[in-house]
Image (tube, rainbow, N blue to C red):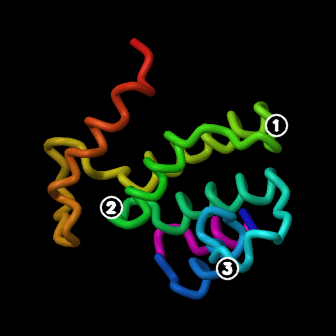
Amino acid sequence: MLGLEANKRSTCYMTESKTLCVHISSLLLNSFQSIDLASPVQTAAVTGVGLLYQGSAHRLWTEFLLNEMSKRPTVDQNTDDREGYTLCCGLSLGMVNLCLRDGSTKSVNDGSSDLDIIRKKSIPYLMY
């Protein structure tokens, strides 16, 4: 999965995105929640999102990754698996918003220019 997304890096292909969505349990409908997805598969899918949408400043994925980072682990979830998943959410968030720093020459016209929420929501996760 990661190799495929690395090959399609920064393309935002919808078919690849749908493939990744099937492997992230938070994006599945309630009727499909009974499907058991291994934590490493979900972690690879989240990392694939970062690769596929690298530098795109995609608003939906930015908000999703921020929300996933702030979720608490479920009762049946291993803490180590959750830490790895959260780490990959943070890395993917950084890849998606790679060119959004002040002074960037990249033009952002996709509605994400008001995403000051990234700074506000990520403050608790930053270590000084």
From the viewer's perspective, is 51 left or right of 24? left
Magenta-highlighted residues? 3-11
Residue type at mark 1? Asn
Give how far across and how far down residue 59 sits, in percent.
32, 64
Which mark, residue 78? 1
Q: Secondary structure at mark 1?
A: loop
Which mark, residue 98? none
* Residue holding disc 3: 19
Residue type at mark 2? Ala
Q: Nearer the viewer, residue 88 or 103?
A: 88
Q: Secondary structure at mark 2?
A: loop
Give how far across and how far down residue 52 sits, in percent.
54, 68
Quarter holding the C terminus? top left
* Residue holding disc 2: 57
- 6 magenta-colored: yes
Q: Nearer the viewer, residue 69 or 45?
A: 69
From the viewer's perspective, is 120 left or right of 109? right
